[in-house]
Image (cartoon, helix red, strand yellow):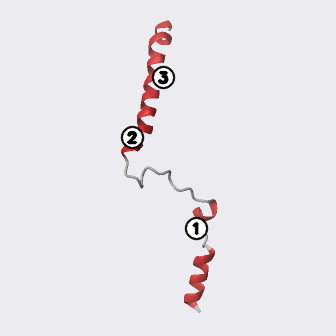
Amino acid sequence: MAFFRQYIAPLFIVLIFLVALLAVSVRIFLPADMAQPAPVETEETAQGSITPGLALAITEQQG
């Protein structure tokens, strides 16, 4: 158990840190439009509700 605590556990911690560092650093090499955070959708737009501007455009086309 002491071998695991002294050698294996710290190695896992360092490996996890290096993988996280690599994942964050790779964003430098992405194209500019992909390096931005993903857009956040509100609950209303995620459920498919119609925006007021779109509703006005639909009613103008029908009338």
**Label 1 packing within 10 angstroms: few (<14), some (14-19), many (20+):** few
Nearest the viewer among 62 and 37 is 37
- Marks 1 and 2, the one that precedes in the sequence: 2
- Check disc 3: other Cα within 10 Å, few if <14, some if 14-19, many if 20+: few
As measured in the structure, the alpha-carbon distance from the residue carrying label 1 to the one carrying label 3 is 43 Å
Residues under labels 2 and 3: Cα distance? 20 Å
Depth order, front residue of 50/18: 18
Q: Secondary structure at mark 1?
A: loop
> Which of the 4 image quarters holds residue 62?
bottom right
Numbered disc in front, either 1 or 3: 3
Whether label 1 touches label 2, CB < 8 Å? no
Q: Position of residue 5 (x, y in %)?
A: 50, 12
- 34 relative position to 41: left or right: left
Residue that label 1 marks: 48
- Which amino acid lies under the numbered mark 2 shown in the image of this protein? Val
Residue at the image point whose x is 57% and y is 83% from the top: 58
Residue position marked by numbered label 2 in the rendering: 26
Q: Secondary structure at mark 3?
A: helix
Mark 2: secondary structure: helix
Percent coordinates x, y for residue 34 in the rendering: 42, 52
